C-alpha cells in the first residue's frame, strides 16, 4: 500500500480487533483507530514500543497535510523543536522518523531536531542562571532565592521544506483521477 | 520549485485537541480527573485501593486502568465496589486521549465525581500525553532510589503532585527523603509533595484531603 494511502486508510477507525499494516519500512499494528501503535517491527527486526514512533508519525502527518494545503509536493526536510523536559529522546525520534519515511514518496526527507534546554530563572535577580545539562539547582547560586523552571517542554513542528509538484506530476495526478 | 513553510504546530496537536474536548466534557460534569504516572510497581493501584476506601462514601468514583496486559488492576478496583475499565495497550508504553475516550465509552461509567486514570507503568512516555486530566500525579516509592526526580525530570517537573509511597519501608532502605524533596522542588517549585504508606495508612489522610480540596476548587470554578 502506498504511504499516503496507508495514512489515509489508517485515519479511518477500523473497528474490531487489530490489523497489521506496513507503513514505510516498518510493520505497524493499527488497533481500532489511526496510529495507535501496538508494536513496530523494522530496522533489523527489533520491536519499538516507544512513543517516539507515534510522535514521528504525527509529525509526518502534519507535514503531509501542510504540503497538501500548499499545492502538494515532495517533503525534503522538517525542523522540530524538542525540549529537555519533553520526555522525547532526539536520536530515537530520528530513528523512528527514518523508519516512517523509508520507502515512502518522501524517502530521504530529513528530520532536524532543535534541542531546547530548560531554564532555571531567578525572579529576584531577574535572570536565568547557568546550569549544566541534567543538573538542577535548588536555589539561586547568587542570592539564594528559589528558582523557577521555564521552557524545555517544546515539542513543536517549526517549519518544513518541500519540492513543489512539477506540471508533469500534476498532469499525471489529474489523469489518474 | 522549493518552498519553505512555517508550521508552528505542536507535534502532538491532534492528541491535545482531543484532550481539550475531554476536559470540556469533564468540566461540564464537574468531574475531577487525576492522571497517575509512575514506574511499574511503585504502588499506584495500592494507592487507588486505599483511596477509594478512604474517600467520603458519598463521592462517586471510577477508575480507568492502563496496562500492557491483564485485567488484574481493574479487578482489584472492582473488588472494592468501584467501577473500573481496563485498557490493554498490547505493548504500547502510554495512554493517549483517544484511548481514554474509547475507554470511557466502553466502560459505560455513570457520571462520577472523581475519575482516576492509572497510566501504564512508565516514568517517561506518559509524560508527553495530555489525557484531559485536571492534574498529573507522579508516584515514587522509596524502594526505587533517591535520585529518580533528577533522572526523570520531565514528569517530576509537570506533575502538580508528587506522592512518595511505601513510606513504611523508609526504615529499611537507603532513601534520603529530604534530598528527594529538594530535587522535586527544584524541578517544580509550586508542586505539592506527599509522603504516605497505602499499606499502613500513614499520610493517606493528607492525600484524601488534597483530593477533596481539588474537587471543591473544581466545583467552584
Image: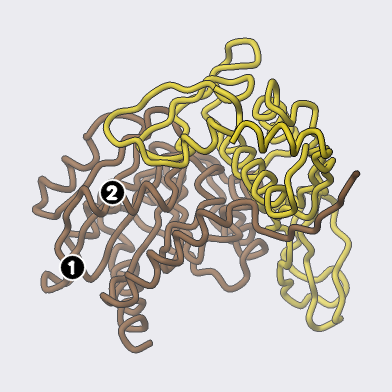
CA gap between label 2 and label 1 equals 14 Å
Q: Is residue A149 above or below residue A30?
A: below
The quarter in which the C terminus of chain B is drawn is bottom left
The correct choice, above or below, for B20 with respect to B107 in the image is below
Left or right? Give the position of B208 relative to B18.
left
**Letter of the chain shown brown in the rendering:** B
Say whether residue A122 is visible: yes
Q: Is residue A8 above or below residue B181?
A: above
Residue B173 visible in the current orientation: no
Query: What residue is shown at x 47% (from left), y 64% (from top)?
Result: B161
Horizontal and vertical percent position of residue A88: 66, 43
Front-most of residues A74 and A38 = A74
The image position of residue B180, as x and y in percent, is 58, 54
Q: Which chain is yellow?
A: A
Pinpoint residue B155: horizontal percent, then vertical percent. Answer: 56, 53
Q: Position of residue B203 (x, y in %)?
A: 33, 63
Q: Residue furthest bottom?
A: B220
The chain holding disc 2 is: B
Local crowd at mark 1 within 10 Å, few (<14), some, or many (≥20)?
some
- Marked residue nearer the N-terminal end (2 or 1): 2
Secondary structure under tag 2 reads helix
Q: Nearer the viewer, residue B28 or B126?
A: B28
Q: Which mark is residue B103?
A: 2
Amino acid at each position: 500500500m502506498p504511504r499516503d494511502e496507508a495514512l489515509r486508510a489508517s485515519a479511518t477507525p477500523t473497528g474490531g480487533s487489530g490489523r497489521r499494516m506496513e507503513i514505510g519500512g516498518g510493520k505497524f499494528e493499527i488497533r481500532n483507530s489511526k496510529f495507535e501503535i501496538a508494536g513496530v517491527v523494522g530496522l533489523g527486526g527489533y520491536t519499538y514500543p516507544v512513543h517516539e514512533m507515534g510522535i514521528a508519525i504525527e509529525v509526518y502527518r502534519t507535514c503531509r497535510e501542510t504540503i497538501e494545503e500548499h499545492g502538494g509536493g515532495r517533503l525534503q526536510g522538517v525542523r522540530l523543536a524538542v525540549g529537555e523536559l519533553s520526555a522525547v529522546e532526539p536520536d530515537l525520534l530520528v530513528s523512528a522518523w527514518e523508519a516512517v519515511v523509508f520507502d515512502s514518496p518522501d524517502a530521504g526527507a530529513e528530520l532536524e531536531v532543535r534541542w531546547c534546554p530548560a531554564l532555571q530563572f531567578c525572579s529576584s535577580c531577574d535572570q536565568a542562571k547557568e546550569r549544566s545539562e541534567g543538573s538542577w539547582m535548588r536555589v539561586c547560586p547568587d542570592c539564594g532565592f528559589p528558582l523557577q523552571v521555564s521552557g524545555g517542554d517544546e515539542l513543536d513542528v517549526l517549519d518544513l521544506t518541500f519540492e513543489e509538484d512539477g506540471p508533469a506530476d500534476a498532469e499525471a495526478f489529474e489523469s489518474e483521477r | 520549485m522549493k518552498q519553505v513553510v512555517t508550521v508552528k504546530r505542536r507535534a502532538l496537536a491532534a492528541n491535545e485537541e482531543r484532550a481539550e474536548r475531554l476536559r470540556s466534557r469533564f468540566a461540564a460534569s464537574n468531574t475531577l480527573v487525576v492522571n497517575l504516572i509512575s514506574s511499574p510497581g511503585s504502588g499506584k493501584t495500592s494507592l487507588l485501593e486505599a483511596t477509594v476506601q478512604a474517600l467520603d462514601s458519598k463521592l462517586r468514583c471510577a477508575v480507568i486502568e492502563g496496562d500492557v496486559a491483564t485485567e488484574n488492576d481493574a479487578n482489584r478496583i472492582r473488588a472494592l465496589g468501584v467501577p473500573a475499565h481496563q485498557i490493554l495497550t498490547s505493548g504500547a508504553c502510554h495512554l493517549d486521549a483517544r484511548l481514554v475516550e474509547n475507554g470511557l465509552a466502553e466502560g459505560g461509567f455513570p457520571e462520577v465525581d472523581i475519575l482516576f486514570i492509572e497510566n501504564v507503568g512508565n516514568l517517561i512516555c506518559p509524560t508527553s500525553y495530555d489525557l484531559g486530566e485536571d492534574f498529573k500525579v507522579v508516584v515514587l516509592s522509596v524502594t526505587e532510589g533517591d535520585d529518580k526526580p533528577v533522572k526523570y525530570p520531565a514528569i517530576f517537573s509537570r506533575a502538580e503532585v508528587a506522592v512518595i509511597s511505601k513510606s513504611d519501608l523508609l526504615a529499611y532502605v537507603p532513601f534520603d527523603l529530604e534530598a528527594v524533596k529538594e530535587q522535586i522542588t527544584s524541578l517544580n517549585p509550586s508542586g505539592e509533595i506527599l509522603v504516605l504508606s497505602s499499606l499502613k495508612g500513614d499520610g493517606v489522610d493528607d492525600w484524601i484531603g488534597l483530593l477533596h480540596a481539588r474537587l471543591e476548587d473544581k466545583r467552584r470554578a
